[in-house]
Amino acid sequence: MSKRFTTALALLAFAGLATAAGPALQGDIQTQPTNWHAIIMFLIFVTMTMGITYWAAGRTKTSSDFYTAGGGITGFQNGLAIAGDYMSAATLLGLTAMTFSRGYDAYIYMMAFFAGWPIILFLMAERLRNLGRFTFSDITSYRLDPSVRTMAALSSLVVVVFYLIAQMVGAGQLIKLLFGLEYNYAIFAVGILMMVYVTIGGMVATTWVQIIKACLLLFGGTLVLILGFSQFGFSLTTLLEKVTAVHKLGADIMTPGSLLSDPVTALSLGLGLMFGTAGLPHILMRFFTVGNAKEARKSVLYASGFVGFFFNVIFLMGLVAVLLVGQNPEYFEGGDIKGALIGGGNMVAMHLAHAVGGNMLLGFLAAVAFATILAVVSGLALAGASAIAHDIYARVIRKGECTDKEEIKVSRMATIALGILAIILGIAFEKQNIAFMVGLAFGVAAAANFPVLILSMYWKGLTTRGALWGGYGGVISAVLFVVFSKSVWVDVLHNAAPLFPYTQPALFAMPIAFLCAYVFSVTDSSARATKERDAFEDQYVRAQTGFGASGASH
Amino acid sequence: MSSVIYERLRRNPKFDELVQKRGSFARTLAAIVLIIFYGFFMLVAFNPKVLGQPIAEGSMWAIGYTVEMGMFVFFWILTFIYVRRANGEFDDLTAEIIKEAQKETK
């Protein structure tokens, strides 16, 4: 396997929905025949979520309701919602496809996606909840100058916009595949539904969309697996014997392949996934929707349980698919099982659903994939809107002197603006190779959001100057490393050779951010810096005890 | 005002106990996860063949798959252990500290 393919896969797995836009799907994606089962089931989902949005609208009166559902979500509900926010359609489609073609390598990726959660619990969840109110910028700017808030809001927006583009383009292509709907219609459908959920129902509606979607995804995936696995008597040994016998990798299917053969890439990817997750604004925001630190901890417990369970389901689904899809000419172009899968590599999970449950189950799983996209996009839009309306408008521009009503109004306008932007960018980037964008989003999250956030919670010595240098240093270096890497410099800008040899920025950009934050903090001898260091005491006590933390309003 | 009460919370010896106990517990668990996780990644990078070996002669279960499945379960159990202790013992201690600080006000 060429290095190029390896890199592409690396980004794919990273990729949220960008999977659909990665090289595996480039070339011809034909519009499929209209899938009525899927459309009807999806319409049921939309009707249900619209009902919830209507109900949520009545409960969305204050800015706290709008951003955090009034802090009234329970740990269990939030755990499901986090799982719903975190497991994108690429988790279902991309990782099943990766298991199908590469075997064990996919399982290694799943571990990298999973291992961030215990770390978030041990080091962050409690402090996030005790210090934050609506956004994670509340925490970074807790005792620092408002300019730190602006910086944190801007880097949140960078993450949100790149992630959003990846999701929208992926959504359009997936929906075209799964539903037989035109790309542009699909983009408009996603953009408009997202605007409706978020502007009308705020965080309450978004949370419930994510909860329902998480349940559907868990149910659908598990059902497909049970139906498929039953054909092998639920015996992993039997399954593996048969898979090894037919797969092109043979016995090596359970051996790590070339995916992570380079230690630098392996380490950088591990860091980027682990700490990128801990710096994604839409994930961090979910910690403010629960009433206290107790519920915040429970959220992670449930979320990691669901995510871990589902990864294991997906890996087995991929193995089952090797036999039930990979050996069935019906699913290949021209009936040649050595050729290409109909609809492209990412259709493995869908073909498997069809193989074990016919058109009904295929339609159901396709509807779940669409619902998944909506849930993730809504969470992103809300995180972006809170950065604009709460951080930049209410706190920095109006210096906290604006009414709740005004702030919500700006949030809604910001959501609509983000929705329109997402539609425009989704259409503009249709034919682009956008695989790098999610890498970029994770890179910025790991290199800009995470370092400043963790330092502001743990290190007394952090000053405004250090936070600004660290944050901007992280954003700029992460962006430059990605631009100079092969995925942009060669694949998008068509230069001959990359200026930066690795595709994963985290291992390099994170130290730059930490170093900048450290150096520019310790050398800061201004009066403001002294005051900021002194203010750490109170923040520290509050972080530890939760005393004075904003409580639930319901 | 709030600064006064924060000062009082902090002066309570139980506060140091809380911070010390919970902090070292969290750090220990985080270290376990990080060491196993990056240790595993280094094995993937430097000696992938080992992970492909069967766990026993003739078994279909590869070492890598078995170990990793164990990691999924183990990491989740660690989160369970932390949540249990933090939501019980540590939160009780926190509640005591807050109560005592508020009592002083009266």
Image (spheres, coloured by chain):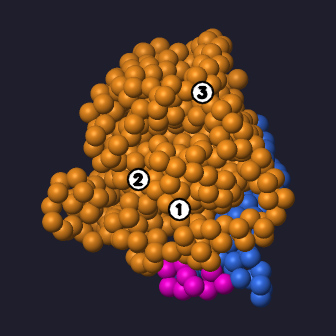
Question: Which span of residues is magenta-colored?
Answer: B44-53
- Direction from residue A305 to residue A120 in the image, left or right: left
Q: Which chain letter matches label 1?
A: A
The residue pinned by badge 1 equals A101
Q: Which residue is mark 2?
A: A24
- CA–CA distance in space, label 2 to label 3: 24 Å
| Vertical comparison of A41 with A14: above or below | above
- The stretch drawn in magenta includes residue B50: yes
Cβ atoms under marks 1 and 3 closer than 8 Å: no
> Where's residue A146, x and y in %?
35, 40
Q: Chain of mark 2?
A: A
Question: Can residue A506 be seen?
Answer: no
Inspect the image, locate mark 2, and give the three-letter code of the amino acid beneath it.
Answer: Ala
Q: Is residue A475 left or right of residue A193?
A: left
Chain A is which colour?
orange
Looking at the picture, how far across and down is residue A445, in whole percent? 42, 52
Image location (x, y in percent) of residue A327: 62, 57
Asked if marks 2 and 3 fall on the same chain, the answer is: yes
- Identify the amino acid type marked 3: Ala
Q: Which residue is mark 3?
A: A38
Q: Residue at x 49, y 60 (%)?
A: A338
Badge 1, how many Cα within 10 Å: few under 14, some, many 20+?
many
> Which of the image's four quarters has the N terminus of chain A?
bottom left
Which SS class for mark 3?
Answer: helix
Evaluate whether label 2 is on the same chain as label 1: yes
Image point (69%, 31%), residue name: A360
| A485 shown above or below A54 | below
